[in-house]
Each structure stands twice: as C-alpha cells, then as structure tokens.
C-alpha cells in the first residue's frame, strides 16, 4: 500500500528577504496542491485586488521587475534567468530586474494569486493547477524542456523494482512526484506501488538518497551528477526526456489581464531570456563560469551539466515545446494523477497565449543550438 511520509528533516538553505518595492514580480515555481487549496476563493478577485498596473516606460528609465526564484540555489536549467541579468539582456530590453530566491514556489504562487505579482516560471503543474482552480493565467513561453532523471540506489535495477520502495518528493504535485509516477506507469505500475517521503526541498533529496533513507528520486541534471559523484553506487534509472518525450515542462506564465495591458513588458522579458539562452549556447566557458557562480556546484559538475543540457537541447531558444500535442498530453496526465480535478476543462487553447512569443520571434528570428 502506498504511504506518504512527511517531515524528514534535512537542511535546505535559508530563505532570503522579500523586496518591499512596488514592482512587477516574476516567480519561478513548483507548486504544492495543498498550498493552492484557497486559490479558487481568491483567483477570481486577484486581478481586482492588485495595485494599479504600472505604466510601461518608454524613456531611458528601466521598468523594475522582481524575480522570485523557487530553487535555492538555482539549477543549471534555470541559468538563463541569471545570465540575462549578468550579461545585461534585461537592461538592454528596458528592464531592471532584481532576483529574489525562495525556498519553494509556494510563496511565488501565493503572491501571484493574492495580487503581488504578474509573472511566474517553472514546472507546468503550477500553471495547470492554478488555471484549474480559476486563476486567469496564460502560458507564454517554454524556457526549458525536461532535464530530470530518476536516480536510484543499487538495489533498484529497473523501473519495476521501484515497487515497494520509497521515492523522495518535494510535494504531491510538482515534477519530483509526477515524473516518478509517469515512470511507474510506463511499466504498468500505479502510483500506489511505491511509497513517498515528502522532504524539505531538492537539497534534502540529495542527502536522503545518499544516506539510504529513500531509494529513488527525480533530479535535475546537476543534482543528479552531484549525488552520483557522492555515492558511485547510485545510478541513473531513467532519463525522463527519453521515457516521456511528449512531456510539457518549464513554462513562463503571465496574469492575463496584466499581459493584455502591458504587452511590451511581457515581450521584453521573453526577449531577454531567449537572448540570454542563445548567448549561453554560444559561450561554453563563460556560461560554465556563471553556472559555478550561481549554482555553487563543482566546476566539473557544471561543465558536464552544460554539455548535457546543450546536447539535449533543454534550453529553449524559440517556440519549441509549447505545442498542443505536448500540452494536452501533460494535462491529461495531470487529470489522471490527481494533480488537477478530472472534471477540469482546461486545455491548450484555454491556458496558452502564443501571441507574445510570435511577436518576439518575428524580431529575433531563428536561433542556433
């Protein structure tokens, strides 16, 4: 029988202070369903409760934006948000961005729903859960495809061996949960075939797997390389991009009312990120140096992560990933797994707006991997 164990205690870093300035906020998030339990009561009123929408600056003065990031420290797959800051792409496009790290995406989505922010970026379960609960949010660009793999102990030789084992997760909604369930389903096993330990963030998963308290977990490429380096008996059980190639992962979303009122800010943000990720693909050594600076991983781990992400085309520099096939496939799984209600009618057409990205791509043109 499936068991969910909560509260294994591991250190996962300190949360930084929140900015008090009245600015647009961007959140990078991985949502918890429990954290969204009140969203249906607040989503419809969220836009009305927000402070007046700030006018877009057409002068040399930069439009301020606070970016709330869910992972502390960030992973390489999110490095584009930092490269855009470090290399001046935000400023070049008229934005003044302050990056504020959060321990999870819960604070980011609560802020967005209650009126403290207009943008978010992260696992697609976040957009799906919020939209299913009534929030008027739209997906506008995919910043990355799925870079996660399931890392397992030596006694788990195949996906079927996960039956009866304990899988570490961060919540019952995000990729740390949904991707192992997809892996189980791929070999005919239900989610209930395994047990789940809810831990306090991704760093805790590394510690728990290395100590044997869990037998498997889904990791971003750099975390995976780190944990295998720590304990060579651990191994990659499945790369999710190969196991589930149609998975929709890593999207930027916007409050629909704000987006319609401030198209130039939305387009400037997308433009900055695409330019940054194109720069990253063309500048290996400099990007690895940035990765070491911001992620804190060892240089060899960062270098291997860079090469893996580039080879797999995980960093998106165009319209890839956010298509009807992938989005609707993923939404179907969210329904069947309980991430969103089975009765939810959300679809690609209702939660995706490609007009911002189309305008950006018309100006930028195609990129090169």
Image (cartoon, grey):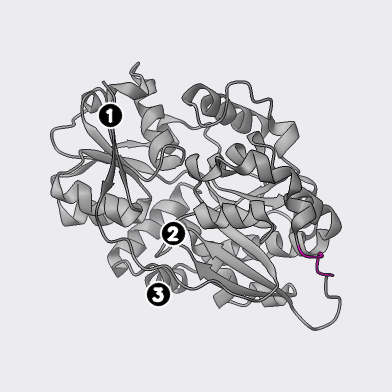
* Alpha carbon separation for disc pair 1 and 2: 26 Å
- 223 or 63, nearer to the observer: 63
Report how many numbered discs are placed on residues in the image. 3
Q: Secondary structure at mark 3?
A: helix
Residue 52 screen position, x and y as percent = 82, 65
The C terminus, quarter of image = bottom right
Q: Which residues are magenta?
A: 51-55
Is there a contact, CB below 8 Å, between mark 1 and mark 3?
A: no
In the image, taking residue 115 as reference, residue 170 lies left or right, namely left
Residue at numbered disc 3: 293
In the image, taking residue 303 as reference, residue 323 lies left or right, namely right
The N terminus, quarter of image = top left
In the image, which is nearer the foreground, mark 1 or mark 3? 1
In the image, taking residue 104 as reference, residue 96 lies left or right, namely right
The disc placed on residue 3 is 1
State whether residue 321 is above or below residue 275: above
């Amino acid at each position: 029988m499936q068991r969910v164990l909560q509260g294994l205690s591991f250190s996962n870093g300190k949360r930084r202070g929140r900015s008090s300035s009245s600015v647009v906020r961007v959140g990078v998030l991985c949502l918890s369903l429990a954290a969204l339990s009140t969203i249906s009561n607040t989503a419809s009123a969220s836009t009305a409760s927000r402070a007046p929408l700030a006018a877009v600056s057409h002068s040399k003065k930069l439009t301020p934006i606070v970016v709330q990031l869910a992972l502390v420290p960030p992973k390489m797959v999110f490095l584009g948000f930092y490269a855009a800051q470090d290399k001046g792409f935000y400023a070049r496009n008229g934005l003044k961005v302050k990056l504020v790290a959060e321990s999870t995406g819960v604070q980011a989505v609560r802020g967005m729903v209650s009126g403290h922010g207009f943008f978010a970026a992260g696992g697609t379960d976040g957009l799906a859960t919020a939209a299913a609960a009534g929030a008027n949010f739209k997906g506008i660009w995919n910043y990355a495809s799925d870079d996660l793999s399931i890392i397992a102990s030596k006694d788990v030789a195949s996906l079927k061996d996960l039956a009866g084992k304990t899988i570490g997760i961060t919540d019952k909604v995000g990729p740390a949960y949904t991707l192992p369930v997809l892996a189980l389903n791929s070999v005919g096993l239900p989610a209930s075939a395994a047990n789940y330990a809810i831990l306090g963030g991704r760093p805790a998963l590394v510690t728990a797997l290395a100590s044997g308290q869990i037998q498997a977990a889904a990791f971003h490429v750099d975390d995976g390389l780190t944990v295998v380096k720590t304990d060579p008996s651990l191994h990659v059980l499945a790369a999710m991009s190969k196991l589930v190639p149609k998975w929709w992962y890593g999207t930027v979303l916007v409050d629909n009312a704000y987006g319609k009122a401030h198209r130039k800010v939305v387009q400037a943000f997308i433009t900055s990120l695409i330019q940054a990720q194109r720069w990253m693909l063309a500048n290996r050594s400099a990007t690895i140096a940035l990765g070491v600076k911001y992620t804190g991983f060892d240089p060899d781990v960062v270098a291997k992560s860079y090469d893996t992400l580039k080879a797999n085309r995980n960093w998106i520099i165009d319209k890839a990933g956010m298509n009807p096939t992938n989005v609707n496939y993923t939404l179907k799984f969210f329904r069947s797994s309980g991430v969103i209600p089975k009765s939810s009618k959300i679809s690609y057409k209702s939660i995706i707006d490609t007009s911002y990205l189309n305008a950006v791509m018309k100006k930028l043109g195609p990129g090169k991997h």
